[in-house]
Image: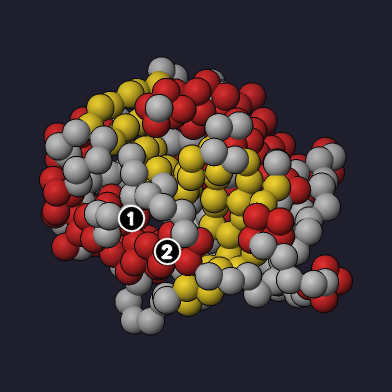
């Protein structure tokens, strides 16, 4: 375990920043990770160096793992909760109010998936299983000791593969807007998939939130605008993630066909108006698991967990106990 460097990030939150975010949502470059003046200071413990009370003040640290470097941020205190981002996203796409609400009772760790930000790319063809192995290496490096894992969309697939491949690594799972890897999941509608991969941020938001939830979409964008230097996955990484996701949904990733082996309790949640992941997939996913329950949120879409972040965080807290 170790931290190579950390960066303190100033806050921005103006209307202008929101417009900048819209303009760069799909094209911003990841941070360079240049060392700050703090890097020359005397060595500190990880808790002192990397943990913050709120996500917007949390520096980006780097864990040296058996599967390469992984960029992460840590906030709060209590039982550990690891959050796995979806396709194309970076740590900057977790709404601060959701992370901070969860951090009231948990030590929350967010991180960048392979090839994003300061996280090392993985050799060979990217798969969900390979991403799960890197996630397991992060858990080991940070000594998180059986964290609960919350995965959004593709991140939920990584969480499932993690529990299959490394059953001793995780506690309870929360799978948000995710799909089964058995080959039985309903496909992503082509129009929604095209919108999600669009260079038009408005198109992306249109498949994350229902049309009558414009206020929630704007609020989410304003939340993200508070991250300085907002960035997403490079295009090539996003494309590789999409291919891994397709392989998983087709039942071609071995971990996806073995999710019945998951022995920990699982909360499967989604919005009942999810344009990217038909809500019926939540029921299909629950049917593949041994100890699972399903929760569908009314008039909510793929980004249901951000629509009422505080209420969702409370439900997660209740589930995790």
Q: Quadrant of residue 135?
A: bottom left
User: Which residue is pictured at 78% across the width and 56% down the height?
Assistant: 9
Label 1 with label 2: CB-CB less than 8 Å: yes
Q: Is residue 307 left or right of residue 134?
A: right
The tally of labels here is: 2
Q: Quadrant of the C terminus?
A: top left
302, above or below 118, in the image:
above
Q: Which residue is mark 1?
A: 169
Q: Tell me residue 104's x, y (percent).
A: 60, 32
Q: Tell me residue 26's x, y (percent).
A: 60, 57
User: Which residue is pictured at 59% across the width and 48% down the height?
Assistant: 93
User: In the rendering, which numbered label is found on residue 186?
Assistant: none
Q: Is residue 30 left or right of residue 162?
A: right
66, above or below 145, in the image:
below
User: Which residue is pictured at 63% across the width and 46% down the height?
Assistant: 75
Residue 90 shows in this picture: no
> Element type at marker 2?
helix
Q: Quadrant of residue 286?
A: top left
Q: Quadrant of residue 264?
A: top left
Label located before the other in sequence (1 or 2): 2
Mark 2, Cα crowd under 10 Å, few <14 / some 14-19 / many 20+, is some
**Viewer-closest of 154 and 175:** 175
227, above or below 219, in the image:
below
Q: Which residue is mark 2?
A: 140
> Element type at marker 1?
loop
- Mark 1 to mark 2 CA distance (whole Å): 8 Å
**Viewer-closest of 274 and 149:** 149
């Amino acid at each position: 375990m170790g931290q190579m460097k950390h960066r303190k990030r100033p806050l921005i939150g103006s209307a202008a920043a929101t417009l900048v975010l819209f303009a760069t949502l799909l094209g911003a470059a990841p941070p360079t990770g240049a060392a700050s003046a703090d890097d020359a200071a005397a060595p500190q413990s990880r808790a002192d160096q990397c943990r913050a009370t709120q996500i917007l003040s949390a520096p980006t640290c780097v864990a040296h793992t058996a599967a390469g470097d992984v960029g992460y941020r840590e906030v709060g205190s209590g039982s550990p909760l690891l959050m796995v981002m979806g396709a194309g996203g970076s740590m900057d796409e977790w709404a601060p109010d959701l992370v901070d609400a969860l951090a009231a009772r948990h030590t929350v760790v967010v991180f960048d998936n392979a090839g994003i930000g300061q996280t090392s790319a993985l050799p060979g063809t990217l798969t969900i299983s390979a991403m799960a192995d890197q996630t397991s290496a992060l858990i080991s490096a940070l000594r998180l000791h059986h964290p609960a894992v919350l995965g959004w969309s593709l991140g939920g697939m990584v969480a499932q593969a993690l529990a299959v491949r490394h059953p001793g690594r995780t506690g309870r799972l929360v799978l948000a807007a995710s799909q089964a890897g058995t080959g039985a999941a309903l496909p992503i509608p082509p129009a929604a998939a095209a919108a999600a991969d669009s260079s038009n941020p408005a198109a992306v938001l249109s498949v994350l939130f229902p049309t009558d939830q414009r206020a929630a979409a704007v609020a989410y964008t304003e939340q993200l605008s508070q991250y300085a230097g907002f960035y997403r996955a490079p295009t090539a990484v996003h494309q590789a993630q999409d291919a891994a996701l397709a392989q998983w949904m087709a039942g071609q990733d071995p971990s996806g066909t073995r999710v019945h082996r998951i022995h920990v309790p699982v909360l499967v949640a989604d919005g009942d108006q999810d344009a990217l992941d038909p809500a019926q997939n939540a029921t299909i996913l629950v049917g593949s698991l041994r100890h699972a329950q399903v929760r569908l949120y009314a008039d909510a879409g793929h980004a249901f967990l951000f629509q009422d972040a505080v209420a969702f965080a409370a439900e997660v807290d209740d589930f995790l106990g």
